[in-house]
Amino acid sequence: MKSKMKVFLGVAALLLIAGGGLFLYTSIRPAQSWAEYNPQISQADFTTQISNKYFALPLGKKLVYEATNRGGSERIEIEILKETKIIEGIETVIYLDREYKNGQLVEETRDYLAQHKSGDVWYFGEDVSNFVDGKLKDHRGSFMHGRDGAKAGIWMKAEQRIGDSYRQEYYRGHAEDMRDTVETGLTVSTGMGTFRDCVKVYDWTPLELTSREHKYYCPEVSSLVLIEDIFTGKRTELTDMVLASTG
């Protein structure tokens, strides 16, 4: 019992050092509080026209994020595809996300998103392919709304209120990402420029204790511009953005 208490206190201390009581609270609050999570989904309420102030996804939009740390270089490439996917009657946008480490593909994900009439962007599933040494390893982290008890969640709210906490996805034991709104009205500077009126969110999952990130979304580009790893301090910045040609 004493050894278990020491481990608990050590984790609590680490979380407090990482940035305050908010992280401790969200990381250890009991999963039972979400046991009855049951979002009400109506096909008529959703559209593929994603125009959220902080997270707009016009067709053909491309984003590049880069980071450098002691483990080498990392690069994330995002593209909004022309094709769509129907999930439980909801037509969704395909958000293709490719992650590279030292030039080698380590993960490719197709995220499926649609915007609610409230302006909130909902997350209906993801197909994940994980690679090791260039070879497919597994599809760990995949989930699909309506399959095996998995349920959709909110990727980005239209209205940002400090203290809001919500599920981004729910596939018990496999995909349980959470998001808390930490600050609003921020100015954020990166190598690409300075952005104003940004929102800072805290992303975490009860499935991975060391997976904790701050993310900054800014309306000037309607995109994520910066990711900060709470434990390592690594910064992943938006370095390029291209919108589809209208010509």
Image (spheres, rainbow, N blue to C red):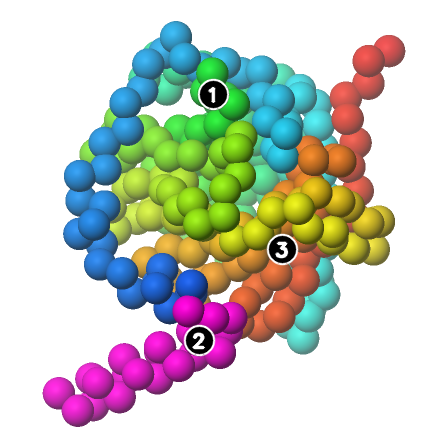
| Residue closest to the far left | 1
Residue 247, compared with residue 205, is above or below; it is: above
Mark 2 highlights which residue?
16
Q: CA distance from mark 3 to mark 1?
A: 26 Å
Is residue 211 shown in magenta? Answer: no
Q: Image point 31% across, 41% down: which residue?
A: 170
| Label 3 residue SS | strand
| Badge 1: residue crowd in 10 Å (few <14, some 14–19, many ≥20) | few
Tell whether 167 sits left or right of 82.
Answer: left
| Label 1 residue SS | loop
Number of numbered discs overlaid on the protein picture: 3
Q: Nearer the viewer, residue 104 or 15?
A: 15
User: Quick one: quadrant of the N terminus?
Assistant: bottom left
- Closer mark to the observer between disc 3 and disc 2: 2
* Labels 2 & 1 near each other (Cβ < 8 A): no
Q: Image point 36% across, 60% down: which residue?
A: 26
Mark 3 residue type = Ile
Q: Earlier in the sequence, mark 3 or mark 2?
A: 2
Task: Identify the image quadrant of residue 153.
Answer: top left
Give residue 172's position: percent from left, percent from top.
Answer: 24, 46
**Residue 142 in view:** no
| Residue closest to the far top | 44
Mark 1 residue type = Ser
**Residue 42 in view:** yes
Mark 3 highlights which residue?
227
Give residue 12's position: percent from left, percent from top.
Answer: 35, 77
| Badge 2: residue crowd in 10 Å (few <14, some 14–19, many ≥20) | some
Mark 1 highlights which residue?
118
Give residue 99's position: percent from left, percent from top.
Answer: 60, 49
Tell whether 170 sits left or right of 3.
Answer: right
Magenta region: 1-21
Residue 202, compared with residue 46, is above or below; it is: below
